[in-house]
Image (cartoon, rainbow, N blue to C red):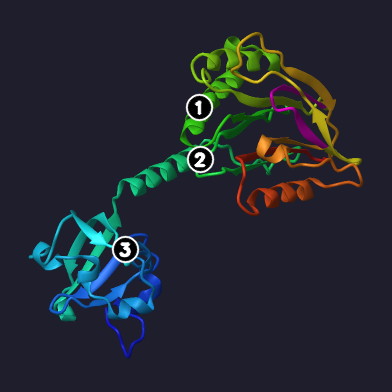
Amino acid sequence: MKEQGGAPLALEVAGFRFDGMNLLDMFHEALVIWETSTGAVLYTNEAARALYGYSWGETSDLSLDEIFPGWEGSLRNTSFSLQTATHRKKNGIFFPVQFTCRSLSGNAGDVMMMVASDVSPENLVHDSVSLAASIQRGFLPGDLEGDARIEVRGIYRPMHLISGDMFGYHWDDRQGILSGYLFDVMGHGVPAALRTSAIMVLFHQAFEDDARAGVSLEEKLAWVNSMAESRILSDSFAAAVCFRLNLPEKRLDYCAAGINGFLHGSGGGLKKIASPGSLLGLPGAAVFGSGSLPAEPGEYFLFLSDGFLDHQVEQENGPLSFPEAYDRLFQAGYTGAARDDQSALCVLVRKT
């Protein structure tokens, strides 16, 4: 690793020369290289500059003492396993880190390299929530685009890292029947996400086990409600809609609980289909909104959580194709800051 005429550090491996700035800036952990005889910082990658709050120009005259006070008393060997210490940001704030140091061998002389990560409680919480968000996203089904009869696309945009919305579907290729559901738990953040995961399990069970949850959509939604009311939604509630699209019979059956509508696209434009019904988790007898619609080739259905549905306007003037409707939803979901969790399950009956 060397610096030539003030140019960025370069790295040579097995005869290949790399621009060290670009290579090391790819690391997510903070990397600092310094000279032990003077304490002068020779290099910081992008993660280190972000961690300590310095710009690229400010690191040219930086001393290790400014970010790691008392480092000489802490580092007495040339190689260290994982340790903890207190480092300091440019603004003077001290924070805990875990770090590992190594002496660069060969012609590096007294040059040392340190990899550090922030282990302050708030940072660890953020990392845990990020991991939970990744796990939650893994529960979602992928898009279905390879079948000549049907297409399914999903949109999932949490307001924060984790969402109170979730959706799922099952495509029976042999019978030509698509069953699906979308639900929205009250609230945001970790409490809503925990309830969402539990309700997702119930919907999976309801649509996979007719003996347990019944055959009709009303029976399945009532079973989910009975299981969730006292255990999961004892101090909360949720809205949901489920459907069964039967391609041989060209019919869409639906049953709703608190999601008061979905969108139906056809040659006449995009219309909202009202589907009033009781929320999941409310005390007393639940009354769900159910019905059926014809489902002709070329028509499509957009099942939306409140984050989308509250801001959608019926398009009755002129047709809107399925890709156009999906793209409009996608742009609405990912333009600007989200004001609510936004999820959509979009289904097209293809023209064969």
Say if 179 sits above or below 310 in the image.
above
Pinpoint residue 216: horizontal percent, then vertical percent. 70, 14
Q: Residue at label 3? A: 30
- Camera-nearest residue between 118 and 323: 118
Query: Is residue 152 something one can see in this rendering?
Result: no
Residue type marked 1: Arg
- Camera-nearest residue between 311 and 142: 311
Q: Quadrant of the N terminus?
A: bottom left
**N-term-proximal mark, 1 vs 2:** 2
The structure residue drawn at horizontal position 56% and vertical position 37%, both measured from the top left corner, is: 140
Marks 1 and 3, how far apart in space?
A: 36 Å
Q: Residue at label 1? A: 195
Q: Residue at label 2? A: 162
Pinpoint residue 223: horizontal percent, then vertical percent. 60, 13
Is 352 displayed left or right of 64 in the figure? right
Task: Report if residue 331 lies within the magenta region.
Answer: no
Query: Is residue 125 something one can see in this rendering?
Result: yes
Residue type marked 3: Ala
**N-term-proximal mark, 1 vs 3:** 3
Give the residues in magenta. 251-264
* Crowd around label 3: few <14 · some 14–19 · many ≥20 (10 Å): many
Q: Label 1, secondary structure: give it.
A: helix
The structure residue drawn at horizontal position 29% and vertical position 75%, both measured from the top left corner, is: 43
The structure residue drawn at horizontal position 54% and vertical position 24%, both measured from the top left corner, is: 199
Task: Farthest residue to the front: give it.
Answer: 92
Pinpoint residue 290: horizontal percent, then vertical percent. 76, 19
